[in-house]
Amino acid sequence: MPLVWAISTDRATLALVLGVVALASDALDGIIARRYGVESELGRILDPLADKVLAAAVALALLVRQALPSWYVVAIVARDVLIVAGSVVLRPRIGHVPPSLPIGKAAATSIGIVLLAAIAGVPRAAIEWLALASTVLLAWSLAVYAARLRQLVRRDRLSN
């Protein structure tokens, strides 16, 4: 991953440009897919999975450089592992992967903002506050996804 390499080799400007391009291209491909109706089941699996892998890799690279608090990296990875695990449980039961929820997109955007701020060298105190705000969104999104999982599993049990 070029972005992780740029962070690891202390090429902050390149890392910042790559990070902005990654966030913008991810947003743009989602908008295009929805607008032109070219969303697919595979895309609903791979796109969020790629986002989660990239976020975790970047967060870990920033953690190694001591640009992020460890508790925030744990929050990112734990939430994403739980969401992926929920999808693995849910997909065989309902036959498809439900689309992302707006709160999930907001939480993912907040992760991107914190990571970009850390790459840009924003002071550590500001990073901690941004990370705290992002963690609130991460927890909220996890609660909403868990509620949806329970609802869909319950609906599946009732229909079988």
Image (cartoon, rainbow, N blue to C red):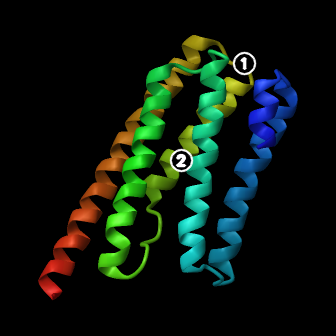
Q: Secondary structure at mark 2?
A: helix
Residue 103 picture location, percent across and down? 43, 53
Q: Residue at x 58, y 75 (%)?
A: 42
| Residue at numbered disc 1 | 121
Would you call the spot at circle 1 few (<14 residues within 10 Å), some (14-19), or many (20 or more)? few
- The amino acid type found where label 1 is placed reads Gly
| Residue at numbered disc 2 | 108
In whole angstroms, how far apart are the C-alphas of marks 1 and 2? Answer: 20 Å
Q: Secondary structure at mark 1?
A: loop
Residue 26, quarter of the rendered image: bottom right
Left or right placement of residue 34 versus residue 152 in this view? right
Residue 148 picture location, percent across and down? 28, 64
- The amino acid type found where label 2 is placed reads Ala
Residue 116 picture location, percent across and down? 69, 33
Q: Nearer the viewer, residue 52 or 138?
A: 52
Mark closest to the chain's N terminus, 1 or 2: 2
Q: Residue at x 35, y 48 (%)?
A: 142
Q: Is residue 102 above or below residue 91?
A: above
Residue 146, quarter of the rendered image: bottom left
